Image: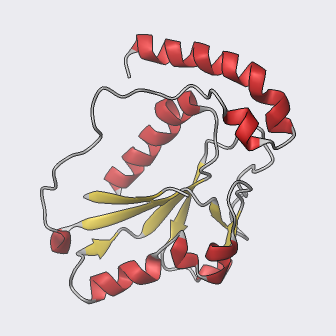
Amino acid sequence: MTPREIEAFRTGYAAWFARAKPALDERRWKDAFAGFPAQKHSAIPFAAPIKSLREIRLGLLTTAGLYLKDEQQPFDAANVEGDASYRELPLALPRDRLGIAHDHYDHAAAEQDLNAVYPIERLRELVGAGELGELAPVAISTSGYCTRLDTIAEETAPRIAARMKALGVDAVLHLPV
């Protein structure tokens, strides 16, 4: 985004938040997000693959609000503006050590089968079958609810991208929840 686009978004966001705060406080999501200032992108965020799926290291990014129960602070699900932070989830850890801290989606499918929001088992099957090269050793989790899009764009997303790059990731599977 250009500086002008960022400033226009911040101005629009501030006006929206002032109007929406009572509805956010009362958890009336439909009312709160009416008129939310959507960003307009001038380019499609797509890059042509340089390797086949069988050769890539895949990173996983989920917005399901997953965190390690005994080691990490849960996402601040009660915050009316959301939580712009992220958590790293080592793939080697047992799944029963993961918790969900995200109040803005129905957890029924995730509780029945965590692969609905964190498809590690399915991805491991693809690696085992030779259809996918390998998985990065950690996945990244965010809370998909955050109204502070400027913070996401300027801080969180660049940090996640840098971490994925440091992990040697060739492509990212993003699971928006």
| Residue 132 to residue 167: above or below | below
Q: How many marks?
A: 0
Task: Determine whether, in the image, residue 174 is placed left or right of residue 43.
Answer: right
Q: Nearer the viewer, residue 112 or 123?
A: 112
- The residue positioned 37% from the left and 54% from the top of the image is 164
- The residue at 27%/67% (across/down) is 57
Residues 65 and 161: in front is 65
Residue visible at 82% across and 34% down in the picture? 23
Instruction: List x then y, in percent, for residue 172.
Output: 34, 58
Looking at the image, is 93 positioned above or below residue 117? below
Here the colouring is: secondary structure
Where does the image place residue 100, in percent across and percent down from the top left? 69, 66
In this rendering, the answer to whether 133 lies above or below 128 is: above
Location of residue 168 by image quarter? bottom left
Residue 143: percent from left, percent from top: 62, 52
Q: Residue at x 16, y 55 (%)?
A: 49
The spot of residue 58 in percent (x, y) is 31, 66
**Is 43 positioned to the left or the right of 2 in the image?**
left
Does 150 appear above or below 104? above
